[in-house]
């Protein structure tokens, strides 16, 4: 019993324990704030649209590819851009910077890409197609297609 009474009177160990608990709590709160900013939960970042695109060889000729919106949200004309680059096995080595963003697209829209703004035509060979959302800089589609 005397030991218990001595324990209740001796309060020297309480202050360090409370100090450690407060420091741990502050560390957890600061970690949550840093993680929130790092993962974009607290900032104003625009999100990439939920969209499905596909690129295929145009079956009616051997000098164009079809970019098709196969589902998801519609996109405004200035909200995206596409690039078609000739691969190593193609007959020409150039980059088509197609201004596909000049067309608003919604589900079922098909765009026929035959030439770039300089009139350089798509020919038989492999091409690398990239579509990018201009608001969030998210890649919507990154694929290869063979034109035959």
Image: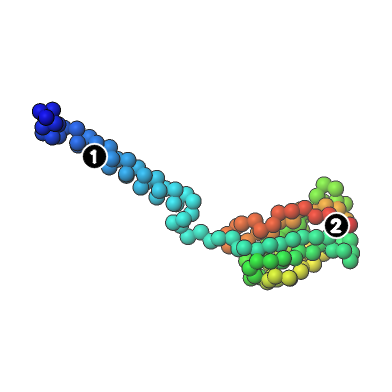
Q: Furthest residue to the top?
A: 3
Residue 51, position as x, y percentages in the image: 65, 63
Q: Secondary structure at mark 2?
A: strand
What number is the disc on residue 147?
2
Spot occupied by residue 17 in the image (x, y as percentages of width and height): 24, 36
Please state, as top left, top right, bottom left or bottom right, where the N terminus lies in the image.
top left
Q: Mark 1, mark 2: which one is toward the viewer? A: 1
Q: Is residue 143 left or right of residue 62?
A: left
Q: Which residue is mark 1?
A: 18
Q: Secondary structure at mark 1?
A: helix
Q: Tell me which residue sits at (62%, 63%) in the image.
A: 50
Does residue 120 appear in the picture of this structure? no
Residue beneath the point at 48% across and 54% down: 40
Along the line of sight, which residue is nearer the eye, 75 or 87? 75
> Cα distance, mark 1 to mark 2?
71 Å
Residue 83 appears in the rendering: yes
Which residue appears at 44% of the width and 56% of the height? 42
Residue 50: give its label: none
The total of numbered circles placed on residues is 2
Position of residue 16 relative to residue 25, above or below, is above
- Sequence-wise, the earlier of marks 1 and 2 is 1
Q: Within the image, what quadrant is residue 103 found in?
A: bottom right
Q: Is residue 80 left or right of residue 31?
A: right
Q: Residues within 10 Å of mark 2 (few under 14, many from 20)?
A: many
Residue 63 place in picture, x, y as percent: 87, 62
Please tell me how crowded label 1 is: few (under 14), some (14-19), or many (20+) other residues with Cα within 10 Å: few
Quadrant in which residue 138 is drawn: bottom right
Rendered residue at 70%/70% (across/down): 107
19 with respect to 5 (left or right): right
Dots 1 and 2: beta carbons under 8 Å? no
* Residue placed most toward the observer, 91 or 26: 26
């Amino acid at each position: 019993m005397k030991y218990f009474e001595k324990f209740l009177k001796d309060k020297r160990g309480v202050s360090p324990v409370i100090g450690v608990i407060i420091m741990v709590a502050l560390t957890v709160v600061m970690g949550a704030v840093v993680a929130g900013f790092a993962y974009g939960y607290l900032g104003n970042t625009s999100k990439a649209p939920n969209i499905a695109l596909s690129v295929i060889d145009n079956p009616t000729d051997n000098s164009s590819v079809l970019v098709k919106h196969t589902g998801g949200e519609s996109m405004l004309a200035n909200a995206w851009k596409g690039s078609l680059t000739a691969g190593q096995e193609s007959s020409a080595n150039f980059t088509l910077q197609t201004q596909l963003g000049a067309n608003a697209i919604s589900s079922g829209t098909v765009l026929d890409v035959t030439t770039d703004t300089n009139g350089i035509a798509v020919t038989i060979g492999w091409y690398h197609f990239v579509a990018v959302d201009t608001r969030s800089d998210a890649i919507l589609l990154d694929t290869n297609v063979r034109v035959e």
